[in-house]
Image (cartoon, helix red, strand yellow):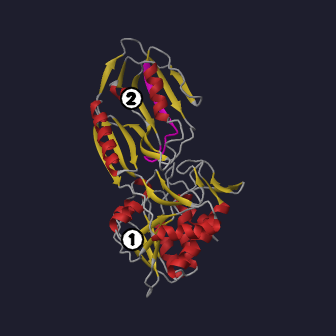
Amino acid sequence: MIINLFKEITKIQRCSGTHQPFIDFMVLFSAKYNYICKIDDAKNILCYKENITPKICLQSHYDMVCLQDGKIPEIIEVDGYLTAVDSTLGADNGIGCAYMLALMSEGAGCEFLFTSDEEIGLIGANNLELPLVSEFMLNLDSEEESRICIGCAGGVDIFGTFTNTKIVQNNENKTLYELSIDNLQGGHSGVDIDKNIPNALKLVALAIKECDGVLLDINGGERINSIPKKCKAIIASNHEPKITHPNMKIEKIETQSEHYKRFDDSVIEFLAHLQNGVREFDDTLHIPKTSINLSIIETTIDGLKVSLSARSMDNDELTKIKEATTKELESFGFEVSTNGKYPAWNPQINDFSKTVLEIYKKYNSEASFEAVHAGLECAIFKDKYPKMLVTSIGPNIYFPHGNREKCEIASVYRVYEVLQEIIETINN
């Protein structure tokens, strides 16, 4: 049932920023199984049974990362995994939503909270206006079976705008080149940041710097929370650029130009200088503690804009990396703004997480606690509801936010058994 429900909601447009199709689905689904359905201004959805005081809230976000806006994933099954044809799958967090729909179809007496726009800054959770009464919350956005999440990184998005351009004469008869790179591995800018995945923007910037290229145009990256897979730039140089990755293509532009509009060299200096990736590693948790990802770069009418995603398991360190990156951008001539800051969820073992672990060990003796270097809405709910005990679980999902995303089918059903027993134990 769960896989069928997942496939059903995958047919619904759920790219971040799109709400009404899934809201319409939930209104009908709730009515079918006699649940009250409330929607707030942030497009969060809360479902619950009338005249029942729930003890536990199940929570998932219903939006998904779409590498192409409006793309409906074409799901296929390969060797026991669900994946999609040349797109993200949306198992993050569509499987969590499917779990909740399955439980609703069984009449479970829980609160079911479907939040909006998690993938673009945890917007729904930050702006939640629906009152929760449960003592416990089980988030279903984790991506490693048997790992019970009790902590996560905080994050902030950093934007730099550069407008120092000028029209110059091509006195040196520089040749124009197009540099492009595509089909890199990509991945999640948090949980995958320590996997040595190549960053398309850094590779192109390196090639430009090495040939003393003058930057005329550049565009690359897909989403603020993804390691960029592609980038394309046009430059002028007296030296033919050298390939910095097997996927890179360099094409000479035969058209000669007497004048061209160029960016100041400080743009490439910044891109090449930025220490991208893990800044500090947590040896206790065995995950990155602090990191930054150069996510998107785009040429605009007025100049150029870069987008970066900073994360840390510690709120003080998050503030430090935000301030340091801001100063670095400003030193290279960028105007800086930030957005989407969300707090870290400090790892905490409590009575609820102990119960979840005890139940989990019945099904998997290797079950254990973990923290993740990614943003979970749990951190925000802990701020909003300090007395609520929060834990997160989920099935095996690999390579989220990229077109290699896949979900293990058997794992989906194993975790559902654990989930059913957790609810039965809490409600009895």
Residue labelled with disc 2:
273
Residue 81 or residue 261, whichever sits in front: 81
Q: Secondary structure at mark 1?
A: loop
Look at the image and tell me in which quarter the N terminus lies.
bottom right
The residue lying at 35 percent from left, 55 percent from top is 343
For residue 224: magenta?
yes
For label 1, the crowd category at 10 Å Cα-Cα, with few meaning under 14, some 14 to 19 and many 20 or more, is some
Q: Is residue 4 visible?
A: no
Measured from the top left, where is residue 300 in percent x and y?
36, 37
Q: Is residue 304 visible?
A: yes
Amino acid tagged 2: His
The residue lying at 44 percent from left, 86 percent from top is 50
Judged by its main secondary structure, the magenta piece is loop
Direction from residue 244 to residue 258 in the image, left or right: left
Amino acid tagged 1: Met
Image: 273 above or below 293: above
Judged from this view, the residue extending furthest toward the top is: 172
* Residue 269 sits in quarter: top left
Measured from the top left, where is residue 195 in percent x and y?
54, 41
For residue 272: magenta?
no
Q: Which residues are magenta?
A: 222-236
Measured from the top left, where is residue 390 in percent x and y?
44, 67
Residue 234 or residue 37, whichever sits in front: 37
Image: 191 above or below 382: above
Residue labelled with disc 1:
388
Looking at the rendered image, the disc whose residue lies closer to the viewer, 2 or 1, is: 1
Direction from residue 33 to residue 385 in the image, left or right: left
Q: Which numbered tag is attached to residue 82?
A: none
Q: Secondary structure at mark 2?
A: helix
* Mark with earlier residue (2, 1): 2
